[in-house]
Image (cartoon, grey):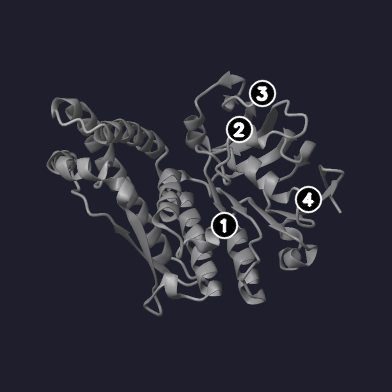
């Protein structure tokens, strides 16, 4: 199995970092420092090495360092599939971010061909008790990790749906206005649905084949829609009058939800304790990583923000053991260096500090 890791990461005018350069090897990277020092900003920078909006879902403008607001740049030396790439990601004056791989301008989705990045952040701790939107994003991130084209299908579907919803709000009743849009939604929607099911199957197999200290989660896609493009096309046409009344599209993959159950206890994830919900999330991220290691040929980059929260010392140690066994370069944050004692020399320990609004990274 080939490795996937960053040997250098440079942040320029990114969030709280005026200029930070991190040289590292393929081992996990443990970042410690006080709250507000800029640890999560480093994880966000690494998350940009994958398609999508990053772990905070922020705009390019929001990522720039203030008050200068000069724009920002993130550069990484990425080792992937026995090749080494220089990846540059930047934004100027709040414009949409740009990407270059080996000095060649490229679409952001191309990053999904050379790297895989997974993350677990504190905001996701509410996954099982928040609305369905968050669970769909979680599911689509998992799906995108296996199928980089999933993002294109999602964008195609959402663009056509926005146009259809505009017609519905304007009370347009002429069928001919809807046909092309519904055809596009049906083709993309069926692909989205199939991609999600394939991802869930891969996660289930990865959980079944592993011995782990973390509980298994049984996942089910809840989506009341036909499985085929033709079936969805017909359903959209049949539902047009109902959608006109609502002023929006009421059937399709955008209405899906993800149901999770703590398998051993047969308890819905939403009814589990806070610690159990966290453990289930860690289990799913690890299963996703194991499945990707088999599918992609290398374990993904893992971003684990404040990962020790709600995990007892036994599970902390188990998590570190599993990350090491997986061979993943996991970027982890915590307020104290003692949180990473169990890792020993299996990880690189870096301290992140902040003085007068400027973050700095140094080795102890």
How far is the residue under mark 4 from the one under mark 1?
18 Å
Query: Depth check: 86 or 197 in front?
Result: 197
How far is the residue under mark 4 from the one under mark 3?
25 Å
Seen in the image, is 25 located left or right of residue 359? left
Identify residue for label 3.
93
Disc 3 packing (10 Å; few <14; some 14–19; many ≥20) = few
Query: Depth check: 147 or 294 in front?
Result: 147
In the image, what residue occupies the spot 50% across and 54% down?
289
Residue 226 image position (x, y, % from top left) = 18, 48
Pair 4/3: label in front: 3
Disc 4 packing (10 Å; few <14; some 14–19; many ≥20) = many
Residue 235, picture quadrant: top left
In the image, what residue occupies the spot 76% across and 41% down?
16
Can you say whether 97 is above or below 186 in the image?
A: above
Residue 50 image position (x, y, % from top left) = 53, 39
Residue 94 image position (x, y, % from top left) = 63, 27
User: Do tag 3 and tag 1 residues touch (Cβ < 8 Å)?
Assistant: no
- Secondary structure category for the residue under label 2: loop
Identify residue for label 1.
123
Identify residue for label 2.
60
Can you say whether 265 is above or below 18 in the image?
A: below
- Secondary structure category for the residue under label 4: loop
Identify residue for label 4.
37
Residue 249 visible within the image? no
Seen in the image, is 184 located left or right of residue 317? left
Q: Earlier in the sequence, mark 4 or mark 1?
A: 4
């Amino acid at each position: 199995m080939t490795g996937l890791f960053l040997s250098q990461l440079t942040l320029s005018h990114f969030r709280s970092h005026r200029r930070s350069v991190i040289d590292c090897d393929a081992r996990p990277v443990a970042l410690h420092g006080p709250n507000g020092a800029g640890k999560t900003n480093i994880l966000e920078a690494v998350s940009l090495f994958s398609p999508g909006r990053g772990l905070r879902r922020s705009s390019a403008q929001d990522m720039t360092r203030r008050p200068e607001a000069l724009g920002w740049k993130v550069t990484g030396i990425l080792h992937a599939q026995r090749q080494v790439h220089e990846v540059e990601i930047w934004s100027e004056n709040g414009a949409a971010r740009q990407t270059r791989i080996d000095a060649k301008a490229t679409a952001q989705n191309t990053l999904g061909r050379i790297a895989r990045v997974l993350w677990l952040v504190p905001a996701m701790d509410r996954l099982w008790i928040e609305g369905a939107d968050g669970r769909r994003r979680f599911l689509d991130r998992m799906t995108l990790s296996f199928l980089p084209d999933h993002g294109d299908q999602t964008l195609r579907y959402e663009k056509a749906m926005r146009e259809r919803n505009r017609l519905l709000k304007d009370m347009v009743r002429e069928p001919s206005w809807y046909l092309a849009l519904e055809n596009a939604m049906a083709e993309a929607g069926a692909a989205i649905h199939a991609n999600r099911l394939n991802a869930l199957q891969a996660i289930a197999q990865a959980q079944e084949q592993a011995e782990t200290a973390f509980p298994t989660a049984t996942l089910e896609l809840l989506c009341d829609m036909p499985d085929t493009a033709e079936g969805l096309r017909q359903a959209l046409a049949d539902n047009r009058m109902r959608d006109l009344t609502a002023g929006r599209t009421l059937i399709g993959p955008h209405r899906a939800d993800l149901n999770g159950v703590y398998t051993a206890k047969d308890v819905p994830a939403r009814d589990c304790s806070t610690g159990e919900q966290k453990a289930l999330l860690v289990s799913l991220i690890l299963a996703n990583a194991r499945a990707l290691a088999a599918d992609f040929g290398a374990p993904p980059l893992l971003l684990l923000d404040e990962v020790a929260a709600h995990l007892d010392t036994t599970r902390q140690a188990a998590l570190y053991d599993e990350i090491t066994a997986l061979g993943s370069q996991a970027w982890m944050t915590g307020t104290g260096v003692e949180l990473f004692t169990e890792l020993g020399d299996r990880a690189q320990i870096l301290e992140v500090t902040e003085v007068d609004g400027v973050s700095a990274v140094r080795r102890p």
